[in-house]
Amino acid sequence: MKILKTKIRLNYFVNTLPKQYIFAAIVVISVSAICFSLGTYLEYQTVRLLLLFTVIQLALFVNFGPVVFSSVLSAAIWDYFFQPPLYTIAIRKVEELVIVAVYISVGIVAGYLTLNVRRQKEIALGKEQRTTFLNYLANDLALSTSKESVADSAIRNIEKSFKASSVFFVPNGETKLTILTKSSGISQVDENHLSAALWSYENNEPTGKYTNLYSYCDGQYFPVSTPRGTLGVLGIYLESGDELEPESVALMNNFVTQISSAFEREISNDEIKKINILTESEKLYKTILNLVSHELKTPISIITGASSIILDADTAHNPYAVMNLSSKIYSASMLLNRLVANLLDMSRLESGYITLKLDWCDINELFNVVVNQLKGDLKENNVFIESDLNLPLVKMDFVLMSHALSNIVQNAAIYNPPGTDIRISAEIIEDELLISVKDNGTGIPENFKPLIFDKFYRIPGTKKHGTGLGLSISKGFIEAHGGTITVENVTDGGSKFLISLNINESMDISKE
């Protein structure tokens, strides 16, 4: 089906009308010759029926004029060569005149009815084909998830349905249009076509070939218009010599309408996404502001109070008091450092700006670094490292993974009673490195397990400590490595966090 010349034409042979008369004459003469050669076997009444049947069959292929011509020609041939007396067309009796008139009338009426049946069939096939094309387009547009995919679906369906190349123009924020996508057969679009497309965009009217403006262009341009305004222009490049037909125009207008609706839908979705992002950003900002104002008060108050006491002359001469206050300042500064680090890490995760610095790492060294960093937090717990000393080196970002593991271990120390055992282990099963952090503490209620990796979430009833970002950050860093983290309760009490990393995959999955 071409852009302006459909396969479903009601006057399919109208441009070859002289050939239809020749074709009809050849068919009638050929059938008559065959019947004449079989004259000893066929009665002249039988020949009349065969010729009448031939006229009816011709109506399936030619227009009404050639049908009338073939009916008259076959009647003359039958009267001259087959109806006694032979080789004369003289009509001596009224009965002969009636027979010839009835024959011609039957041929004409039967041919006309057959022609109408053919036309109705072509109309039905045309409607069915147009409906099929529209359904294909609607299905593709429904699956599109962006403006670019809508444009690609439009180009693809126009090529498939109309056998025509096309270009999708969108405004570039200035006074010009830019190409969003185009058919592979189009190398470039010259200034004349851009001017025609721009006029269509600015005036919200079709232009180009077979219109009053820019008719010298090879393409026709349809504005992609919606209630919110014109969103773009669809350029269809027509084949030379094609003529504009109502069926093609109606189908193309339906295409443009569906494409416009889908394009507007994606623009609305983009706006909704922006609004949601702004809403979430504002919500995150308020949450962080409230959290920071609350969580930072304690360490800052400790540092301020302890510092002011140390500066007192009486305290300065008491080494024990100075040592005790200095220890409090150090602990408060470490807490403050962790709070700021967590906020910065969450900011990096939210922005997607994480680049992994992959290198071969010793798992046992990773465990020892984490335990040493958390020496102060783990002083009231029993920590056991239970991994094989001969584990192979694994490629990972040592800093990020140690930070992720530190948050998990610190979480076990903070939210479990003093004296809780914390066991850190690792093993390799097939292609998976499994790191486990298990404790024998209070465990995690089942209904809260799906939520503990959410940002700023703390299990109700637990003591308020930290920002509620530790586990969320750990999950983000582990997933940046292509791994997963899960949590489950242990049957004999406590909980177990399980980190899984594929050690055979290329871990070049950094986010820019």
Image (cartoon, rainbow, N blue to C red):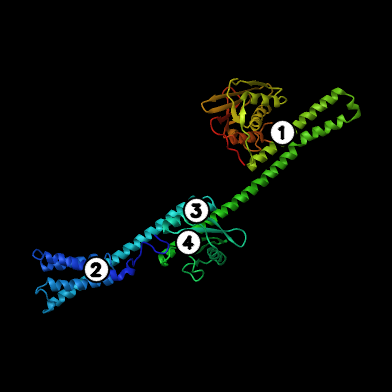
Looking at the image, do the residues carrying marks 2 and 3 touch, with CB atoms under 8 Å apart? no
**252 in relation to 75, above or below:** above
CA distance for labels 4 and 1:
60 Å
- Residue 71 at least partly seen: yes
Residue tagged 3: 152
**440 in relation to 471, above or below:** above
Residue 32 appears at what percent x and percent y? 16, 67
Instruction: Please tell me which of labels 3 and 1 falls first in the chain.
Output: 3
- Secondary element type, mark 4: strand
Please state which amino acid type lies under the numbered disc 1: Arg
Image point (60%, 53%), residue name: 271
Q: Residues within 10 Å of mark 1 (few under 14, many from 20)?
A: some
Q: Which quadrant of the view contains residue 54? A: bottom left
Select label 1 or label 2 by which is in front: 2
Image point (71%, 35%), residue name: 341
Please state which amino acid type lies under the numbered disc 2: Ala
Instruction: Please tell me which of labels 2 and 4 falls first in the chain.
Output: 2
CA distance for labels 3 and 1:
48 Å
Q: Which quadrant of the view contains residue 400? A: top right
Front one among 332 and 235: 235
Residue 388 appears at what percent x and percent y? 59, 20
Residue tagged 4: 236
